[in-house]
Image (tube, rainbow, N blue to C red):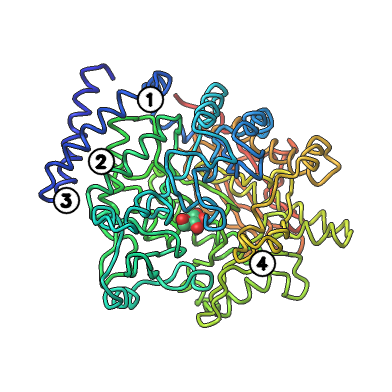
Amino acid sequence: MDERQRSQQVKALKDELRQLYQDLYSDSGEAWEALLRMLDQAEAQRPAVMKDLDARRLQDPDWFKDRNMLGMQLYVGPFAGTLQGVREKLDYIESCGVNYLHLMPLLESPAGRSDGGYAVADFRRVQPELGTMEDLAALTADCHSRGISVCLDFVMNHTSEDHEWARRARAGEAEYQDFYFFYDDWSIPQEYEKHVPQVFPTTAPGNFTWCREVGKPVMTTFYPYQWDLNYANPAVFNAMTDNMLFLCNKGVDVIRLDAVPYIWKELGTNCRNLPQVHTLVRMMRLVCEIVCPGTLLLGEVVMEPSKVVPYFGSVEKPECHMLYNVTTMASIWHTVASHDVRLLRHQLGQVFVLPKEYGFLNYIRCHDDIGWGLDYPYLSRFGMGEVPHKRYLNDYFTGKWPGSPARGELYNDDPRLGDARLCGTTASLCGIEAARYERDGGKLAWALRLDLMLHALIFTMSGLPILYSGDEITQENDYSYHSDPLKADDSRYIHRGNMNWAAAEKRNDPETPEGMIFQGLRKLETLRGEHRVFDSKADTWNVYTGDDSVLGIGRYWRGEKLVALFNFSEFEKTVAISELGVFTDLLTGEKADKLRITLPSGCFVWLLCDFGEEKA
Ligand code: GLC
């Protein structure tokens, strides 16, 4: 794209932005002018190296869909103490094959009222214990020089009650009270409560909190110290956009739009996924395309599939570049516990028919709990009701179910609704923790196989696979949060423990659990990078295995066909596949007998057929 084309493009983007701004904020001439000035300023302040990156990415807009991409998400403190510490660990991060680094919230946030950093008190200051804004810029620069892109959370739904806007609102400044949702008395909040579900029913019930200083209730969808921002006020959109661009100019490549479905509130609705949310996301996308076109938007949309996909927008008017494959993640854990692949097959069937332009982020674990947002109407066909099935899953993953090797903890257990969620690391949920504790070699070998198989599954899917830091070395649950009064109420801290660097030392020894998983992952990542069949443009489908405990996935791209099989059963299985072609086991190099593929429990195979028909 030459300069003239780019300036024409920017003009069109600005026209659309103005139109949407007017739709949302009719009669807001001054605010619009202020936004335009701010965009110009952000563009002028954009560092030259970031502008170079923008230019390169404009030429290659699908760069993040490359099959060589591998992500890792980590908390700076538990991983390496400080941002400077992370810089010193970049060799390790690179040795994992990682080229996309999600740094969990690191901006200033009050101790004990931080929600893991998701209650931001200052969008322009790093949490002092972790370092400074200069350290962040230095880290992103180091990452870029190694070809690693950096993702940062943008917590846009709310601020901490300690944020300057909230402090000024408390001090009585009407201008800042208008940044939030204050009501004169409880009558309107009570109306809202009739339709709005609760995010943290046990740890933070209700959606409003009494603000003593103002003498009014204020909306707090998440924790009482997280005040919801009012995006119906254009000043909020402008100020938050300015904050986002500030972070982009510090070298952040990927903006994770935290809790994005919640950002527009309307009395009488459930305040989730309202049409205005999509307008706002589209506006943010336009802002990025105008000022920092190399930036990606990653939407955190933890909702059922029909609510997730609209956040991609349309081909002509895209919203997010990437979304989490959240239902697939939850369905995978359901499959681990039920040994029945029918739901997962059904779920994947829906993902496989989506346009290949959609970029999913595939993961097994992240910093949050696993919510059992499964397709219950589908499960009911097999006699699995929502409440009893959730109870079974929670019993299984907390190890209460007889024979279950999993060691997790419940999260926000709501006995009224029978609706608890689940926490724990991959290793502990797969049974590695229990097997090590019991010194049971057979159990350990099985749990390690399962752990690797789940990773192989996310590597088989199109999109960007993300490792949760520590999973590459089988890190177990950290129970120390129980004795920390600032964390004890929030069981998500069980899987946010300090990185075990002593264990990481064993990663090159394949005789150790750490080495088995680390080396196993490296092998899978390398194969994924080597074979075009893993390209995100590949066709994907469910392969019939004739067995409801063995999942089969097919991929085809330019003469390469992959059949991946995953045995979720407790028993060894032998299956046959009726796919055309001669297949070789990618991991062993051996020729496969399509009519007799034997998989021990918890094992997978990647079978490749090369028709040798690569076309340009
Ligand atoms: C997102 C985060 C979660 C946080 C919430 C509120 O869902 O992933 O950790 O508690 O937003 O900001």
Contact between labelled residues 3 and 1, with CB atoms less than 8 Å apart: no
Q: Residues within 10 Å of mark 3 (few under 14, many from 20)?
A: some
First of labels 3, 2 by sequence position: 3
- Whether the residues at callouts 3 and 4 have beta carbons within 8 Å, the answer is no
The mark nearer the N terminus, 1 or 2, is: 1
Disc 4 target residue: 409
Q: Residue at x 32, y 65 (%)?
A: 214
The numbered dot on residue 316 is 2
Q: Counting residues from the N terminus, which is met first, the one under dot 3 or under dot 4?
A: 3
Q: CA distance from mark 3 to mark 4?
A: 45 Å
Quarter of the figure that contains the C terminus? top left
| Mark 1, secondary structure of its residue | helix
Which numbered tag is attached to residue 25? 3
The amino acid type, in three-letter code, at marker 3 is Tyr
**Mark 3 residue element:** loop
Q: CA distance from mark 1 to mark 3?
A: 30 Å
Compare marks 2 and 4 and give the one earlier in the sequence: 2
Q: Check contact, mark 1 vs mark 2: CB within 8 A.
A: no
Marking on residue 54? 1
**Rounded to the nearest whole Å, what is the CA distance between mark 3 and mark 2?**
23 Å
